[in-house]
Amino acid sequence: SVYTKIREYKDPEIVVVTMKVLQACQLAIVLPLGVIEPSSAASSTFSALKSIDYRYFVAGGTCAAISHGITTPIDVVKTRIQSDPKKYNQGLRKAAINIVKEDGTGVLLGGLGPTVVGYGIEGAMKFGVYELMKPVFA
């Protein structure tokens, strides 16, 4: 077992710094004197993992996707200003009007799909994992 292999390890200098993470993973804490079994924090962590509330993941993903999706046209105009400052550097509004006149309104939504998907996943993971780990590290 893992505990036997840890006890056989000869280096007395090993000390695990992140005890809470190890407890959350139900790993043993390695000390020069031997092995300490995981505490009740590990069992409470795993009971929290079994009852994951997916609403945090859905809410975080939805909010991030919407907020970044709304700003996609502004990002398109900003990118055009940066790529051709001589042509579009008259301010955001005038640059947007010039872009719509030249390429149509659809160009302002260029990149909307990847933006919504990417930030949706990022927001879901960030807020979902944050809410999941609050009781562990509190």
Image (cartoon, rainbow, N blue to C red):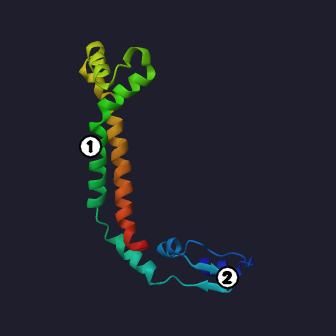
| Towards the viewer: 85 or 47 | 85
Residue 37 placement (x, y as % from top left): 54, 84
Mark 2 or mark 1: which is in front?
1
Q: Secondary structure at mark 2?
A: helix
- Residue appearing at x 72%, y 76% in the figure: 13
Question: Which class describes the residues within 10 Å of circle 1: few (<14), some (14-19), or many (20+)?
Answer: some
The x and y percentages for residue 62 are: 27, 49
Q: Of the residues under marks 2 and 1, which one precedes in the sequence?
A: 2
On screen, residue 89 above or below 67: above
Picture layout, residue 93 above or below residue 9: above
Q: Nearer the viewer, residue 138 or 28?
A: 138
> Quarter of the image holding residue 112?
top left
Answer yes or no: is residue 1 visible.
no
Question: Callout 2, which amino acid?
Answer: Arg
Point out the image quarter for the C terminus.
Answer: bottom left
Task: From the viewer's perspective, tell me whether residue 68 is left or right of residue 32.
Answer: left
Between 126 and 53, the residue placed more toward the observer is: 126
Image quarter in which the N terminus is found: bottom right
Residue in the image at 27% along x and 55% along y? 58
Cα–Cα gap, marks 2 and 1: 52 Å
The three-letter amino acid code for the residue at tag 1 is Ile
Give the image location of residue 68, x and y in percent.
Answer: 31, 41
Task: Residue at the far front: name it.
Answer: 90
Residue behind mark 1: 66
Q: Is residue 124 left or right of residue 82?
A: left
Q: Residues within 10 Å of mark 2 (few under 14, many from 20)?
A: some
Residue at the far right in the pictured view: 10
User: Residue 99's spot in the image, x, y percent?
Assistant: 31, 18
- Please state if 133 lies on the left or on the right of 98 as rendered: right
Q: Which residue is mark 2?
A: 7
Q: Are marks 2 and 1 in contact (CB under 8 Å)?
A: no
Q: Residue at x 24, y 21 (%)?
A: 105
